[in-house]
Each structure stands twice: as C-alpha cells, then as structure tokens.
Image (spheres, grey):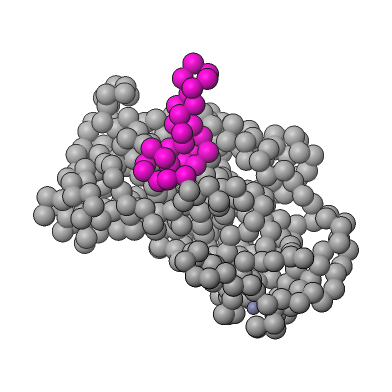
Amino acid sequence: MFHPSFCPNPACAYHSLPTGKEPHRAVPIVRIGSYHTQVVGPVTRYRCKACGKTFSTRTFQLDYYTKRSLPYPTLHQALCSGQNLSSIARLLHCSPASIQNRIDRLSRNALLLHQHILRSHQLHEDLTADGYERFDLNHFFPNNINLTVGKVSQFIYGISHATLRHKGTPSPEQKNPPHPLQALPKPPRGALSTSFASLLQDLSTYWNPSSYPTLTLYTDKHPAYPAALRKVPFLQQALEKNQLSHRRTSSKLPRTLHNPLFPSNYIDRELTKDIAAYHRKSICFTRNVQNGLSRLLCYLLYHNYQKPYRIHWGALRLPPHALLAGIPSEKFKKKLDSVYEQRFFLSHEPLTPLWEALYFRRYKTPLKKKEEYLPKYACRGYTQGSLK
Ligand SMILES: [Zn+2]
C-alpha cells in the first residue's frame, strides 16, 4: 500500500510536510482504481478523504506527465561534463527537446533544494562575487551571469542574470549597410547593477551579523558593484556599522590561488570547462536565457552538493562544497537521495525574489515576445496537475 507523507493538494490540511517533531500522522487516502500506461505499466489512483481530491503515485514523481523515462543521473552527469543537448540526446536516443524538458524538471528540484538549505543556513565565511560575461542568442546580446561564492568553501550561494548592451563601436564595414539587429531596441541601462543588487539582497536569507559579525565581500573594480551595494538598504547599514566591508581587487591580477578573487576565478574556470554553452568559441551557446539558467541550476546542484571539494592523487576525495560551507550532510542528504525521483513541491518552499525570478522563468530572452513556458502543475497554489 502506498503511504504518501503529504497530500499533493496545496489547499488540504495534510499538504504540509511532517516536521519530525510532531507525532506521525497518516494521510487519510483510499484507493479508487488504476489505469495502464505504456511508460510505467499500471498506475494506482487514490482519493484524499480530507479534501476529496484524487491523485496517483505519479503525482509525486519527477517524471510526472512524461511519456518516457530517461535516466536522470546519466543525463545530469553528461550535462556537467561538457556535453551539449544534442550529444546527450544521441547518448540517450531521444530528442534534444526531451533532454531540455528533463533538465527543466531537475533544475526546479535543484532550486528548491538549494533554497531549502539557504533558509536554514547561517553564513560563516567571506564571499566573493563576480559576473561572467557570455552571450545569449548572438553577439549582439552579451550577458552577465553573476554568482556569489564562498571564499573558503567555493560553495555557490546565488545566481542572477543580466542582458547587457552591445559594447564597442561598429566598424565602417558594419555601418554600411548597418546590421538589422543594430536597429532593434537595446536592453535598459543599469541592468548589471540591478541584477547584482538582487543577488546581494538575497544575502539577508543566510547572513546575520549576530552570527558572523565581520563579513567581507570581495569583487573586482567594476563600477556597477558599489552602485548595487547602495541599492540594498540592509547592506548599506552594515557598511556604516563596519559589519560589512567591500574589498575591490583588480581583475587583471594573476589568477593564482593567492588572488583574493580566486573562488570566483575558480568557478569561472569550472563553468567554462564543464558546461558546453560556456566553452570558448563554442557553437553550443545559449539560445534561450531561461534554458541556459536551468542548465546552470543543474550545475549548481552538482557543484555544491555532489562534487568533491578536491580530489588528491585520484584517491583522496574531500567532501562536497556544501560541507566546507558548514552545511551538515543530514540537512540535504535525504533530499539529495531523492532528487532524481521525487518531485519537490513549490508550495513547501517559500522562495525569495531572486529564486522566484528563476523558478518562474522571468528572465527574458532578447527578441522573444512570448512568455516563457512553465507547466501549470509546477506553479504555486495551482491544483496540482490532474487533481480533480
Ligand atoms: Zn488532501
């Protein structure tokens, strides 16, 4: 008999997750039949006696609604080892669209897991922050992917994205005749500072001056960073009270271990090496901003919670970056063990604005007029998929 730990209906009294402190409570469900599927065979349906909604065992699975099962661990490993969508599709004998669909699913789980950890975490290390300049769609739309990274642990705390204006002056050959894309409206000014400010605003989730009274934020000398700090009132107050210091280092210094920006430089190197879209001179560049960010979220899951901090001599494997950041494995092990199978519910995890923008696919792709697609079952407050 199937015993779910919660009812999937967000409006039901049994929807909240058991905390462990409360006595065990069984969700009152009754079996109401089954149906046959070509993908997993018979699937049993149940009705919750508390709210009257019906659901099946598939409602709780990451592969909810899919018509084919693909191996998530293989897909994830391939994605984080420099393979592009077409290459993974060839490996798994399916279409690149199916691969992107599974990456989107996994990225939602990765985001909810990471947000769950950040909400209960207290920062105990300094941070470095930097933006990695790539492009989306074509060279007319450069972007900045901003990341906050732990100075000691190299744990990735936050991600934000900004589409920038095209830099440089067109040459006489480019002006006559002008490229049609040059005539299109340009992204707004100050996008980088706004994006960076949203990244810094998220620090309030996991940094409390009472537990870590002297935080140092290391960045390069880009003028957008002090402007972004001024946009975040609680960080401005922390600067005035000397609880926060902002140290700026030239980005032209050698990228060695002794460079104060080493953690950011290290992540830049890892991303360039491990994600196909970030390889130099790659033809696998990002065509859709949100799809690119989904891949980055899957990489965050791998980097923070699965990848060893260092491997010495091919044998000594240090624990993952999360443990170095002071996050005990008990906090994420249970969720990590089920990240490829169970669907994490948005209604169980309140999101901060930074992660909400990523989850709800609010980052726009240049020249794309349609809203980004997000399945209705993945939205907060929506009656989950096939619930009737
Ligand atoms: Zn219910």
| Residue 3 position in % (x across, y down) | 69, 66
User: In the image, is 292 to the left or to the right of 223?
Assistant: right
Of residue 340 and residue 132, the one placed in the foreground of this image is 340
In the current view of this chain or complex, which residue is farthest to the top?
313
Is there any visible trace of residue 296 in the rendered image? no
Question: Total of numbered circles in the picture?
Answer: 0
Q: Residue at x 60, y 47 (%)?
A: 337
Q: From which residue to which does the magenta span run? A: 303-329
| Residue 26 position in % (x across, y down) | 64, 72
User: Does the magenta-highlighted stretch encompass residue 365?
Assistant: no
User: Does the magenta-highlighted stretch encompass residue 315?
Assistant: yes
Of residue 177 and residue 225, the one placed in the foreground of this image is 225
Of residue 369 and residue 362, the one placed in the foreground of this image is 362
Could you tell me which quadrant the C terminus lies in? bottom right
Of residue 165 and residue 213, the one placed in the foreground of this image is 213
| Residue 107 position in % (x across, y down) | 57, 51
Is there any visible trace of residue 34 in the rendered image? yes
Could you tell me which quadrant the N terminus lies in? bottom right
Q: As displayed, is residue 295 above or below residue 50?
A: above
Q: Residue at x 36, y 53 (%)?
A: 121
| Residue 355 position in % (x across, y down) | 45, 58
Q: Residue at x 43, y 42 (%)?
A: 322
**Quadrant of res 38:** bottom right
User: In the image, is 52 to the left or to the right of 112?
Assistant: right
| Ligand number 1: quarter of image | bottom right
Q: Residue at x 74, y 65 (%)?
A: 2
In the current view of this chain or complex, which residue is farthest to the front?
23
